[in-house]
């Protein structure tokens, strides 16, 4: 696991390695164990910061080369089947290390871009071909590991993080306002944008070939197909799922450093603990995070699982002291990013790193088995052609929410407010943060003119258009796996973990496991209103029933409480600040959001958090 960097000049130039030291070293948290670079002093410089996980010796130093020095690689990630691939290569190549990085290098030497077909894991890597004067870059199928880049007619530059690119003197730093509009829609910047004009992130399941002529080829090498269903009995499906998940867990236990797991108390992470317990001889180190607010706290359920499997368990309570780390959080996430669960994830990774270097988690369970409440809402939508007295019902829901403060009425309002005859528009309104009416409330005329190229609607519609042959649930699962998962959830975990030099592995996101669940009939995922039907059925064999039958909480943060209490003044101070408003926001619109939230007219916690994080992003990256 590492931080990687590279710059490729299309014409020969005088390369001085010391000039790039800062670019590489700003990735140090991703790789505190080793530093290295390679350059031909004419066209290319590659840099790496290494977090040693497999083969801790100096033989794992990067950049790494093949036998004749014609290829050089920098690699961030883990290839879980590298030992199996290595066996097929050993009689034709001389290996200097026991790393997975060297396996990628020799595999590419034989199969070029087809090497990607054989890799099972998470990765982002760059390979320099010294003979062809060509750069090959690839990102894993799901998007676990990041790869960002900028290019012009003189050079191409890439890195694990924007920070390393923005430190380059030849790379301009400008706001991409269309990306800001997309961010306020989704809570993240959808790929391939980053929030910085003309700086991009490589999409999951894609590779790039950059030639000395300046020509760049981008190609998709993998995508999920939900159209080929397997006809199996329910019992046979149970067997297939548990066997493949066990395999995915076992592969992710290969490590030369201490290893453990995150435990939320929900089905997904708890099931991973259960399967780890079958493979590990020592007690598993488990780590959980909680809140003082009981309706956001899952620690009691995590304790049940920890006790059942006799884990070495550690807990941390998050208190509303985010002011102390907010700027650091925004700097590390570097793109506009508003998933508030980044806060507990940050603290969880900080706690975890005190004891281990590799942790497994339950990410991907909801995307595989339809675990989000919005899937229930979509199923209800499929049955309703119209809703009589919709506006009256909205007002009733709003009134009950104001009186009772019960979230159920807020959800009812959200459903009614989102209702639209078009499935795509309904789903987008379910998941968006700022709808068009709310944007109208806070956008100035100047800002509206600067967001003409926004994909606030077309980004998701493109995903739906790729799924015309799928049923409605598979359409949504596909869309989430190609948008929300890589651009939100995996970004959250990657940044929070790598800032603390911690590696996270996710068995549910094994691509072979994903390919298997894509072949499942939808009614084994969502049966009636019962989400994750088959996975829950499997979980009863392994977990306390309280963990399976409890309401889904997710990894939410009590922002609605904090913004009406301890953080109210901080919110006003930042959002009504002239420096922020001058970026194109209307004071009276933001004042209305704050007032309506404070008076329980609406729960605008997510909207206010998105604006707060954006205000800090402007402050940190465009202070002048």
Image: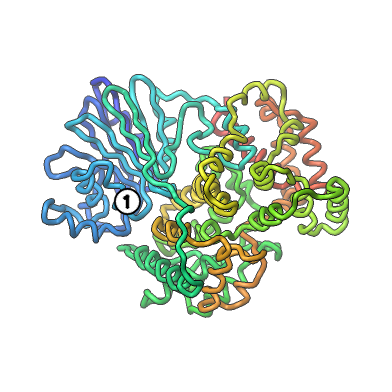
Q: Please say whether residue 368 is visible from this viewpoint.
A: yes
Q: What residue is at 51 percent from the left and 30 percent from the top?
A: 196
Q: Is residue 399 left or right of residue 320?
A: right
The colour scheme used to paint the residues is: rainbow
Vertical placement of residue 276 versus 145, above or below: below
Q: Is residue 400 left or right of residue 593?
A: right
Secondary structure, mark 1, is: loop
Position in image of residue 246 (x %, y %): 40, 69
Q: Nearer the viewer, residue 237 or 563?
A: 237
Vertical placement of residue 443 versus 137, above or below: above
Position in image of residue 360 (x %, y %): 44, 62
Q: Nearer the viewer, residue 355 or 389?
A: 389
Q: Please say whether residue 316 is visible from this viewpoint.
A: no
Label 1 neighbourhood size at 10 Å, few (<14), some (14-19), many (20+)? some
Q: Is residue 598 left or right of residue 250?
A: right
| The quarter of the displayed image where residue 617 is located | top right
Q: Is residue 494 left or right of residue 59?
A: right
Q: Nearer the viewer, residue 389 or 448?
A: 389
All told, the count of numbered labels is 1
Position in image of residue 87 (x %, y %): 18, 60
Quadrant of the snapshot with the C terminus: top right
Residue at which label 1 appears? 33
Q: What residue is at 44 percent from the left and 73 percent from the top?
A: 239
Position in image of residue 290 (x %, y %): 61, 63
Q: What residue is at 19 percent from the left and 54 percent from the top?
A: 97
| The quarter of the displayed image where residue 3 is located | top left
| The quarter of the displayed image where residue 448 is located | top right
């Amino acid at each position: 696991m590492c931080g990687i960097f590279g710059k490729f000049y299309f014409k020969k130039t005088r390369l001085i390695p010391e000039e790039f030291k800062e670019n590489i070293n700003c990735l140090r948290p991703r790789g505190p164990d080793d530093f290295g670079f390679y350059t031909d002093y004419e066209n290319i410089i590659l840099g790496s910061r290494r977090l040693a996980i497999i083969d801790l010796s100096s033989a794992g130093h990067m950049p790494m080369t093949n036998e004749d020095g014609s290829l050089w690689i920098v690699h961030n990630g883990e290839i879980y089947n590298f030992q199996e691939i290595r066996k097929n290569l050993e009689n034709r190549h001389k290996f200097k290390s026991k790393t997975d990085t060297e396996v990628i290098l020799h595999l590419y030497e034989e199969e070029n871009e087809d090497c990607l077909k054989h890799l099972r894991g998470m990765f982002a890597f760059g390979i320099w071909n010294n003979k062809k004067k060509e750069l090959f870059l690839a990102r894993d199928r799901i998007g676990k590991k990041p790869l960002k880049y900028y290019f012009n007619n003189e050079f191409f530059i890439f890195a694990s993080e924007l920070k390393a690119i923005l430190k380059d003197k030849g790379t301009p730093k400008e706001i991409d306002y269309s990306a800001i509009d997309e961010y306020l829609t989704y809570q993240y910047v959808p790929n391939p944008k980053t929030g910085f004009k003309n700086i991009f992130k490589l999409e999951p399941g894609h590779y790039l070939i950059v030639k000395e002529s300046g020509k760049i080829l981008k190609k998709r090498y993998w995508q999920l197909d939900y159209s080929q269903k397997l006809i199996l009995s329910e019992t046979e499906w149970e067997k297939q799922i548990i066997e493949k998940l066990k395999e995915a867990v076992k592969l992710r236990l290969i490590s030369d450093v201490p290893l453990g797991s995150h435990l939320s108390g929900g089905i997904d992470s708890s099931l991973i603990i259960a399967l780890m317990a079958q493979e590990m001889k020592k007690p598993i180190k488990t780590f959980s995070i909680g809140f003082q607010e009981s309706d956001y706290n899952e620690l009691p359920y995590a304790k049940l699982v920890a006790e059942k499997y006799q884990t070495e368990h550690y807990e941390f309570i998050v208190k509303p002291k985010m002011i102390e780390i907010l700027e650091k959080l925004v700097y590390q996430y570097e793109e506009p990013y508003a998933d508030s669960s980044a806060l507990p994830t940050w603290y969880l990774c900080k706690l975890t790193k005190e004891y281990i270097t590799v942790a497994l988690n339950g990410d991907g369970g909801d995307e595989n088995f339809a675990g989000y409440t919005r899937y229930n809402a979509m199923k209800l939508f499929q049955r309703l052609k119209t809703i009589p007295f919709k506006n009256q019902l909205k007002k009733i829901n709003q009134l009950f929410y104001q009186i009772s403060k019960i979230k159920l009425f807020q959800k009812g309002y959200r459903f009614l407010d989102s209702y639209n005859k078009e499935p795509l528009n309904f789903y987008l309104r379910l998941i968006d943060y700022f709808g068009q009416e709310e944007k109208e409330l806070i956008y100035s005329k100047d800002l509206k003119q600067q967001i003409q190229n926004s994909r606030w609607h077309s980004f998701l519609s493109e995903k739906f258009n790729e799924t015309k042959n799928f049923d409605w649930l598979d359409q949504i699962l596909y869309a989430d796996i190609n948008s929300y998962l890589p651009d939100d959830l995996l970004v959250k975990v990657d940044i929070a973990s790598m800032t603390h030099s911690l590696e996270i592995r996710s068995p549910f996101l094994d691509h072979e496991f994903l390919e298997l669940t894509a072949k499942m009939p939808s009614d084994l995922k969502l049966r009636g209103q019962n989400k994750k039907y088959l996975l829950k059925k499997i979980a009863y064999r392994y977990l306390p029933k309280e963990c399976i039958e409890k309401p889904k909480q997710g990894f939410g943060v009590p922002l609605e409480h904090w913004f009406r209490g301890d953080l109210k003044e901080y919110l006003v101070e930042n959002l009504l600040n002239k420096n922020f408003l001058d970026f194109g926001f209307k004071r009276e619109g933001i004042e209305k959001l704050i007032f309506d939230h404070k008076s329980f007219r609406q729960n605008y916690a997510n909207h206010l958090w998105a604006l707060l994080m954006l205000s800090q992003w402007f402050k940190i990256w465009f202070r002048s």
